[in-house]
Amino acid sequence: MYWKIIISIIIAYLLGNISPSIILGKLHGIDIKKEGSGNAGTTNALRVLGKKAALITLIIDIGKGVLAVVIGKLIGGEAVGYLCALAVFCGHIWPCFYRFKGGKGVATAFGAILAVNWILGLSALGIVAVGVALSQRMSVGSLLGSVTFPLICWLLEPDFIHIGCIMAVIVLIKHRANIGRLFRGEEPKMNFKK
């Protein structure tokens, strides 16, 4: 049984390594990690590569989070699904295929959480959306979602709270540069019209 759990976690981590923004950037002759914010995620793909690339990045990043948890649940049940949620999230942030330099994990975390408990996932998304709508900054939405996630986790999926807290803390740490820019008033707004 233990080997099945280990294999599930490895598969989830490797799924997390799939980085559509890096791949799409290379197809355009661009190193996404050296352009814009330098982050290999949806927001930077939007800034550097445009709407189509951002949408593809978003769908794949969410999809791999969902797939990892579904595989974990099928192989080992709910508890293994929880571990796979953390593994795919970490695989996105620290991908071994890209020298452990990936994205900030928000979209992948959303996909994984959605597969753990869709109500929990949509609740977290709603909070992120409110933060983005009020501030016009994706980073504010992500930070608000991270800070409130342990609470909604406790209310809706208490067995996931320990892993949920770990994921929330990692997202906060990955956004430390954004936090600094927010305090200095230097964090750029998203141009929704564009």
Image (cartoon, rainbow, N blue to C red):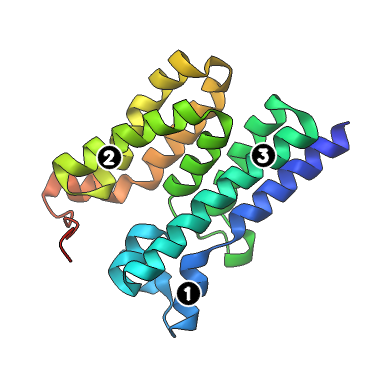
Residue at the far bottom in the pictured view: 29
Q: Closer to the N terminus: mark 3 or mark 2?
A: 3
Quadrant the N terminus occupies: top right
Q: What numbered label is drawn on residue 70?
A: 3
Disc 1 crowd rating (10 Å Cα; few below 14, some 14-19, many 20+) is some
Q: What numbered label is drawn on residue 24?
A: 1
Q: Position of residue 25 (x, y in %)?
A: 44, 76
For image coordinates 16% across by 55% down, the residue present is 189
Indicate the amino acid at tag 1.
Leu
The span from disc 3 to disc 1 (Cα, nearest Å) is 26 Å
- Contact, mark 1 vs mark 2 (Cβ under 8 Å): no
Indicate the amino acid at tag 2.
Ala
The span from disc 3 to disc 2 (Cα, nearest Å) is 25 Å
For image coordinates 55% across by 45% down, the residue present is 89
- Contact, mark 3 vs mark 2 (Cβ under 8 Å): no
Q: Give residue 135's quadrant in the image.
A: top left
Residue at the far left in the pictured view: 185
- Contact, mark 3 vs mark 1 (Cβ under 8 Å): no
Disc 3 crowd rating (10 Å Cα; few below 14, some 14-19, many 20+) is many
Q: Position of residue 166 (x, y in %)?
A: 51, 31
Q: Is residue 38 visible?
A: no
Q: Closer to the N terminus: mark 3 or mark 1?
A: 1
| Of 163 and 70, the residue lying toward us | 70
Q: Which residue is mark 2?
A: 129
